[in-house]
Amino acid sequence: VEKPADTENHNICIYYPHTVGGGYKALFRKVGNQASRYYPPPAPDSSKPYTPVRRDTSFIYEDFMSTGGTDVKVYTIGPNYAHAEARKSPVVDGRVQRDENGKEERFPVLLTPDEKEIARRVCLAFGQTVCGFDLLRTKGRSYVCDVNGWSFVKNS
């Protein structure tokens, strides 16, 4: 996973190994009902590069974590309260699931005791009473992959 170091830049690339078909998926801020797009590898006889080399900024590289197709959004109000919602990951098919009012579909989820402790620590570490972050659940563990500012409360 290749993430721009600039936290306002949401143009993330996930590069897939040849063993699973190759290519890459570009993730971006939602545009209508799209949040990502898959680009297959070029044909073997093509002169095109396998994947584009992005050199326009600095990047952070992370291992890809398979989550079973969901992301968990956690919202805290102080270190002792957290609410969590799951949504379909943009990695699945790039389409945003929306309800009849046009809002992204999310479903309440219960946090484990360990996730509640993670929420408390994130809230305290960033010194914000109101805080939002994303959790990835994989292989029986949870990992913070993004901490958000105030933007997550827009239109709520």
Image (spheres, rainbow, N blue to C red):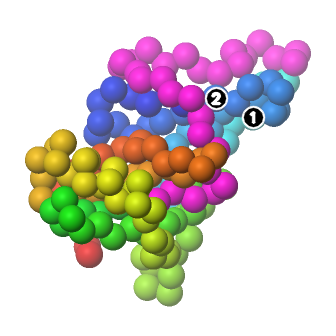
> Residue flagged by tag 2: what amino acid is it?
Tyr
Left or right relative to 107: residue 6: left
Q: Residues within 10 Å of mark 2 (few under 14, many from 20)?
A: some
Left or right relative to 105: residue 45: right
Magenta stretch: give its range.
44-72
Left or right relative to 64: residue 78: left
Q: Position of residue 115 (x, y in %)?
A: 40, 56
Could you tell me which secondary element the residue under label 1 belongs to?
Answer: loop
In the depicted view, which residue is nearer to us: 112 or 96?
A: 112
> What residue is at 66 percent from the left and 33 percent from the top?
24
Q: Position of residue 57 (x, y in %)?
A: 36, 19
Residue 132 vs 46, above or below: the answer is below
Q: Position of residue 119 (x, y in %)?
A: 30, 55
Marks 1 and 2, how far apart at CA = 10 Å
> What residue is at 49 percent from the left and 19 percent from the top?
54
Q: Main secondary structure of the magenta part?
A: loop
Label 1 or label 2, whichever lies nearer to me, is: 2
Q: Residues within 10 Å of mark 1 (few under 14, many from 20)?
A: some
Q: Hey, which quadrant is residue 43 in on the image? A: top right
> What residue is at 33 percent from the left and 70 percent from the top?
83
Q: Hey, which quadrant is residue 34 in on the image? A: bottom right
> Residue flagged by tag 1: what amino acid is it?
Pro
Residue named by callout 2? 15
Q: Is residue 22 visible?
A: yes
| First reached walking from the N terminus: tag 1 or tag 2 | 2
Residue named by callout 1? 40
